[in-house]
């Protein structure tokens, strides 16, 4: 594959990155402004420290501009997407731990599905392409 082919491949992923930016803007804002809403929908008691749940919303919200930048110039913001992908991997791991230890019910998994798992295919395709542009995974992971 040549660099032009990879850049075209990255351009095809722009709608996914833009959708991630919009999703994070909406979900993060909603969680900050209405922290109990999700728990009502899932018929779960809200956490006793709602501000901590609002912080989760802020973490999601803070990625909205980053994903927007990557959608605008896909070849220029690979490391930002890599950090986002790490969160999308660690979130499900944390959920599984909470599920196994009976701290969260299975129905809370809908959050993991929409916030994390649904984005894996596009983000992984993006990261594979951008790593190639950087000269391979090693160079990309080293920050080159």
Image (tube, helix red, strand yellow):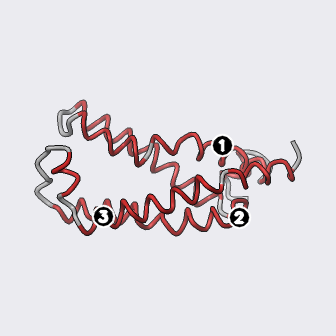
Q: Position of residue 9 (x, y in %)?
A: 75, 48
For label 2, the residue is 76
Q: How packed is label 2: few (under 14 Cα within 10 Å), some, or many (20 or more)?
A: few
Q: CA distance from mark 1 to mark 2?
A: 15 Å
User: Which secondary structure lies at badge 1?
Assistant: helix
Residue at 44% of width from left, 67% of height from top?
Answer: 62
Task: Please say if the residues under marks 2 and 3 sit with CB atoms less than 8 Å apart.
Answer: no
Residue at 51% of width from left, 54% of height from top?
Answer: 84
Residue at 14% of width from left, 45% of height from top?
Answer: 44
Q: Position of residue 138 (x, y in %)?
A: 71, 46
For label 1, the residue is 125
The earlier-in-sequence mark between 1 and 2 is 2
Residue 93 occupies which quadrant of the picture?
top left
Q: CA distance from mark 1 to mark 3?
A: 29 Å
Q: Where is 74 relative to 136, above or below?
A: below
Q: Position of residue 24 (x, y in %)?
A: 43, 60
């Amino acid at each position: 594959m040549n660099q032009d082919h990879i850049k075209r491949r990255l351009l095809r992923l722009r709608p996914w990155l833009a959708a991630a930016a919009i999703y994070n803007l909406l979900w993060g804002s909603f969680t900050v402004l209405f922290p109990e809403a999700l728990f009502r929908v899932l018929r779960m008691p809200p956490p006793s420290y709602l501000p901590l749940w609002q912080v989760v919303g802020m973490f999601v919200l803070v990625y909205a501009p980053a994903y927007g930048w990557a959608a605008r110039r896909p070849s220029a913001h690979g490391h930002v997407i890599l950090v986002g992908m790490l969160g999308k991997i660690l979130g499900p791991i944390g959920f599984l731990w909470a599920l196994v230890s009976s701290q969260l019910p299975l129905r809370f998994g809908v959050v993991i599905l929409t916030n994390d798992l649904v984005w894996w295919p596009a983000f992984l395709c993006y990261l594979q392409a951008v790593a190639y542009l950087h000269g391979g995974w090693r160079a990309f992971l080293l920050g080159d």
